[in-house]
Image: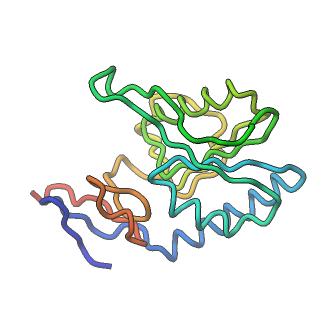
Amino acid sequence: MRTIEIDNLKFEPFIEYDEIKKRIRLIGIDINVQYADKHPVFIGVLNGCFMFMADLMKQVHIPCEMSFVKLASYAGTAQGSIHELIGVGIDLTGRDVVIVEDVVDSGRSLKYTMEALEKLGVASVAVCTLLLKPACLQHEFENIMYVGFEIDPEFVVGYGLDYNGQCRNLPDIYKEVTGAG
């Protein structure tokens, strides 16, 4: 892994893909045990979750369904407040749902997603996130059940995470080099 530069920001290697794969394998084992007698629906929150969800689902060996949602927010309103959950496409009434996120930082979008799903009458909601930034959380969650890595408030890219639409395709995760300007 090498340092990369995007729009005059420098990023250094942070979490290698091999480490990510090992952690996802362990999460998959845990999910297989916890949901062995259920038929969960995994809901990936786009765009950032796509690589994580693809690798995660390869480790889930129980009967399940998958779907993706996208949050629509409108700039210029209450800090780009979230107004809509687009694309579920499955009747979730009475279903066990696992939300798959790339990163939970403030928790604002996760809170909205959970509230929207609960209005649909789900039986349970668990959260599976690749990255969790505990120091950034503005909401309390009791159902973040699966966490790949807890990190400091780092600016990270790669493995689905982007900066201005770039770097989602990188297999490794990089963090911004602070004081590199």
Q: In this view, does 101 lie above or below 27?
A: above
Residue lying at the far left of the rendered structure: 181
Residue lying at the far top of the rendered structure: 78
Where residue 171 sits, quadrant-wise, is: bottom left
Counting from the top left corner in percent of width and height, residue 103 is at 47, 49
Counting from the top left corner in percent of width and height, residue 125 is at 70, 37
Where residue 96 sits, quadrant-wise, is: top right
* Residue placed most toward the observer, 18 or 151: 18
Counting from the top left corner in percent of width and height, residue 97 is at 72, 42
Residue lying at the far right of the rendered structure: 37
Residue drawn at (52%, 68%), measured in percent from left and top?
20
Q: Tell me if 134 is positioned left or right of 123 in this view.
A: left
Residue drawn at (68%, 53%), measured in percent from left and top?
66
Q: In this view, does 39 lie above or below 51?
A: above
Residue drawn at (49%, 48%), measured in percent from left and top?
132
Residue drawn at (25%, 64%), measured in percent from left and top?
11
If the image is split into quadrants, where does the C terminus sit?
bottom left
Q: Tell me if 174 is positioned left or right of 94 in this view.
A: left
Q: Tell me if 57 is positioned left or right of 160 in this view.
A: right
Colouring mode (rainbow / by chain / secondary structure / one colour)? rainbow
* Residue placed most toward the observer, 35 or 136: 35
Counting from the top left corner in percent of width and height, residue 134 is at 47, 41
If the image is split into quadrants, where does the N terminus sit?
bottom left
The image shows a total of numbered marks equal to 0
* Residue placed most toward the observer, 63 or 84: 84
